[in-house]
Image: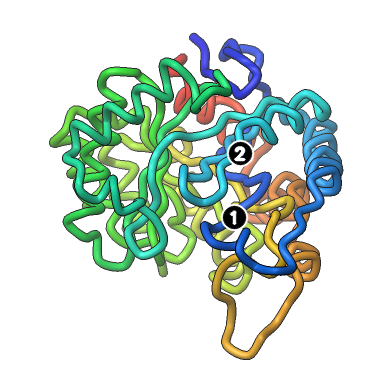
C-alpha cells in the first residue's frame, strides 16, 4: 500500500513516524497586496528544512501538511523542502471552512462538481506542476453551515472514488459528529478519516464517542497552550488509551515553519501586534510532541509501545489503508 507525497508515492513500510497535521506555511488571499509584501522564500525553505531534519533525527519519515487550497498551499515549495530535508511531505486538496475559505465560484457548485475538482488534482496534479495531493482536507466552522456540509459531502464522494484519506478541521472541537454523519451519507470510509482538532474538548468522552464510530481522532494542536494546556491534552490522551482507543488516536501540533506574509496572516488577540518572526518564534518546535509532550504521556502511564502505535502504525493505516 502507498500514499502519494509531493515527491512521489511512498510505500507504507517506508513512512516511519508521521506527524499528521503540520504546516510549512499558512498564507491568506490578499496578503500579496500589502505594500510591504516581500516573501523571503530561501529563509522559509531554510527554516522548514531545519525543523524537518530535526524531526528526521527522531525517526519521522513524513509529515502531512493539510493546508487547504485557499490558505496558501504551495506544492512546489513543499517539494523543495522535502528534497532538501529528506522528509516526505503529503499535501492536500480540499477547501477550508466558510468563514475563511471556499472561493465564491465554488460556493455555487454542487458536491459532485467540487468532488470532480478534487479528483482532477488527485489524479493529474495541481495546475501545471504535476504534483499530486495525497489527502483531502475538509472543515467546519462554529455552525457547520449548509455550504460546509456540501463541501464535506464532496470530500466523501472524492474519497470513495480515489481511496485517499480525509483529514478535517473542527473549529473549537465542534461538530465532529456532523462531519462523520455527512461522510457516511456520501460513501466515506471511516477507517480513512481523521476528525481533527479535538484538543479543546473538556473531557475524553466526546472524543471516545467519535473513535467508537470508526474514525481516527486528532489531538493535533499539541503545544498551542492558548487553546488548551498540554497537561489537559496529556490527561485526555492517557484516558483515551486506557479506554481502548489507542488504535484510533493521532497526535500532532499544527505548527507552521513560516509565512510569506508581511504581517501575521490571521487575526490574533486584539491589541497584540507581532511580526511573523515573533509569532512563529513563540511556537513550540516541531519536535515538541515527540519530546516534552511524550514525556508528559509517559508520566501518565503511556508506554513507548503506545507511542509507536500512535506515531507510526495509526498514520500508516490512515494514509494508506495498510494494516
Q: How many marks?
A: 2
* Earlier sequence position, callout 2 versus callout 1: 1
Q: Is residue 244 visible?
A: no
Residue drawn 47% across the image and 45% down it: 68
Q: Position of residue 302 (x, y in %)?
A: 61, 45
Image color mode: rainbow
Residue drawn 47% across the image and 54% down it: 239
The one of 266 and 142 positioned closer to us in this rendering: 266
Name above or below for residue 165 compared with residue 248.
above
Q: Position of residue 304 (x, y in %)?
A: 68, 36
* Residue 277 left/right relative to 9: right
Residue drawn 36% across the image and 44% down it: 138
CB under 8 Å between discs 2 and 1:
yes
- Residue 74's disc is 2
Q: Position of residue 182 (x, y in %)?
A: 19, 43
The one of 232 and 105 positioned closer to us in this rendering: 105
* Residue 25 left/right relative to 244: right
Mark 2 lies on a secondary structure that is loop
* Residue 148 left/right relative to 241: left
Amino acid at each position: 500500500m502507498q500514499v502519494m507525497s509531493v515527491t512521489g508515492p511512498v510505500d507504507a513500510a517506508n513512512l516511519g513516524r508521521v506527524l499528521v497535521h503540520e504546516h510549512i506555511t499558512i498564507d491568506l488571499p490578499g496578503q500579496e497586496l500589502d505594500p510591504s509584501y516581500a516573501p523571503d522564500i530561501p529563509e522559509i525553505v531554510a527554516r522548514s528544512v531545519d525543523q524537518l531534519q530535526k524531526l528526521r533525527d527522531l525517526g519521522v519519515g513524513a509529515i502531512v501538511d493539510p493546508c487547504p487550497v485557499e490558505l496558501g498551499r504551495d506544492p512546489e515549495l513543499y517539494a523543495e523542502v522535502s528534497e532538501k530535508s529528506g522528509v516526505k511531505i503529503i499535501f492536500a486538496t480540499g477547501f477550508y471552512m466558510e468563514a475563511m475559505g471556499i472561493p465564491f465560484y465554488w460556493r455555487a457548485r454542487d458536491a459532485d462538481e467540487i468532488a470532480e475538482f478534487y479528483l482532477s488534482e488527485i489524479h493529474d496534479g495541481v495546475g501545471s506542476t504535476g504534483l499530486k495531493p495525497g489527502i483531502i482536507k475538509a472543515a467546519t466552522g462554529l455552525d457547520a453551515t449548509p455550504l460546509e456540509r456540501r463541501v464535506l459531502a464532496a470530500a466523501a464522494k472524492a474519497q470513495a472514488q480515489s481511496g485517499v484519506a480525509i483529514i478535517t478541521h473542527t473549529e473549537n472541537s465542534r461538530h465532529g459528529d456532523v462531519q462523520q454523519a455527512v461522510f457516511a451519507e456520501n460513501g466515506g470510509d471511516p477507517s480513512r478519516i481523521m476528525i481533527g482538532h479535538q484538543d479543546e474538548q473538556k473531557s475524553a468522552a466526546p472524543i471516545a464517542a467519535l473513535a467508537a464510530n470508526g474514525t481516527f481522532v486528532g489531538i493535533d494542536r499539541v503545544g498551542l497552550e492558548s487553546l488548551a494546556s498540554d497537561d489537559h491534552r496529556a490527561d485526555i490522551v492517557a484516558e483515551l488509551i486506557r479506554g481502548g482507543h489507542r488504535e484510533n488516536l493521532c497526535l500532532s501540533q499544527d505548527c507552521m515553519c513560516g509565512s510569506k506574509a508581511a504581517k501575521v496572516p490571521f487575526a490574533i488577540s486584539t491589541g497584540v501586534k507581532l511580526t511573523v518572526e515573533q509569532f512563529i518564534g513563540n511556537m513550540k518546535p516541531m519536535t515538541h510532541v515527540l519530546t516534552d509532550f511524550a514525556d508528559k504521556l509517559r508520566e501518565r502511564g503511556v508506554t513507548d509501545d503506545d507511542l509507536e502505535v500512535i506515531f507510526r502504525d495509526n498514520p500508516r493505516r490512515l494514509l494508506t489503508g495498510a494494516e
